[in-house]
Image: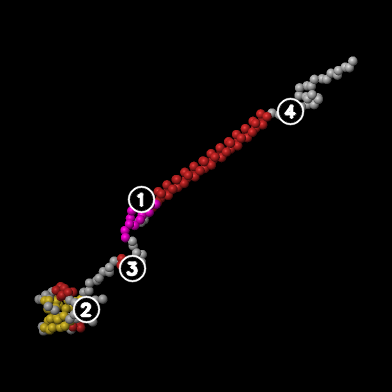
């Protein structure tokens, strides 16, 4: 009779041919590692977005603060607190952008500067005889000084003469003589009536001048 050879039963973990089998593959572990990697990448992306968002908000805040500070400095430079947006200088009502616009007639830049200059003040021209006089004892203006040269010296007046008439004006005091000479026209001949120191009378022709 043929004897049947008995073969030992394979141990757990061994193949039927007596070889040890390798570790069994676990498909669930690969899926878990993929999920973990995906979660990690998503967390990094979210963190990056949050950081960039914070930097952007900080930049916007700094820009707003800087603009408000600049506007405040412009208002202070424009002469204290006023209407926001008002420029430091300019004419007319404030326009856009804090600037003033001129609403009047256009000003020509090539205009003659002398047209806007104030008119020159004219100095009144006063006639003179070149004399120094005081009130006489009775009437008239007593000559006490004669300028050499001068209109009175040219006419023949000397110290001690008394002026009685200047043109058509009677002279009673030295003030009358001063007013009559001031009213005279320079360069126009005037007849003088004088009384000399010796008592004689004489008519002289004088030509009042001006002091320059």
Whichever of labels 2 and 4 marks the residue nearer the N terminus, that label is: 4
Residue sitting at x 23%, y 82%: 149
**Circle 1 residue:** 80
Q: Residues within 10 Å of mark 4 (few under 14, many from 20)?
A: few
Asked if residue 20 lies left or right of residue 133, the reply is right
Residue furthest to the left in view is 138
Instruction: Give the residues drawn in magenta, as a range.
Output: 92-105
Residue sitting at x 82%, y 20%: 8
Asked which secondary structure carries label 1, the reply is loop
Check the image and report above or below for 79 versus 38: below
Whichever of labels 1 and 4 marks the residue nearer the N terminus, that label is: 4
Q: Quadrant of residue 64?
A: top left
Q: Residues within 10 Å of mark 1 (few under 14, many from 20)?
A: few
Whichever of labels 1 and 3 marks the residue nearer the N terminus, that label is: 1
**In front: label 1 or label 3:** 3
Residue sitting at x 17%, y 81%: 189
Contact (Cβ within 8 Å) of mark 3 with mark 2: no
Mark pair 3, 2: CA separation: 37 Å
Whichever of labels 3 and 2 marks the residue nearer the N terminus, that label is: 3
Mark pair 3, 4: CA separation: 108 Å
Q: Nearer the viewer, residue 129 or 40?
A: 40
**Circle 4 residue:** 23
**Circle 3 residue:** 112
**Circle 2 residue:** 209
């Amino acid at each position: 009779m043929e004897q049947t050879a008995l073969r030992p039963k394979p141990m757990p973990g061994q193949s039927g041919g007596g070889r040890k089998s390798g570790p069994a593959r676990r498909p669930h572990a690969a899926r878990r590692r993929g999920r973990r990697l995906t979660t990690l990448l998503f967390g990094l992306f979210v963190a990056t977005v949050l950081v960039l968002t914070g930097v952007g908000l900080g930049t916007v805040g700094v820009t707003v603060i800087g603009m408000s500070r600049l506007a405040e400095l412009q208002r202070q430079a424009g002469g204290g607190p006023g209407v926001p947006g008002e420029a430091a200088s300019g004419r007319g009502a404030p326009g856009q952008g804090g600037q003033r616009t001129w609403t009047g007639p256009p000003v020509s830049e090539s205009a003659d500067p002398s047209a806007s200059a104030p008119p020159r003040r004219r100095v009144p021209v006063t006639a003179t005889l070149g004399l120094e006089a005081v009130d006489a004892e009775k009437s008239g203006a007593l000559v006490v000084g004669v300028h050499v040269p001068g209109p009175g010296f040219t006419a023949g007046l000397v110290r001690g003469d008394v002026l009685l008439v200047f043109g058509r004006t009677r002279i009673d005091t030295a003030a009358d003589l001063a007013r009559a000479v001031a009213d005279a026209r320079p360069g126009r001949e005037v007849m003088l009536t004088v009384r000399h120191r010796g008592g004689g009378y004489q008519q002289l022709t004088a030509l009042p001048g001006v002091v320059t």
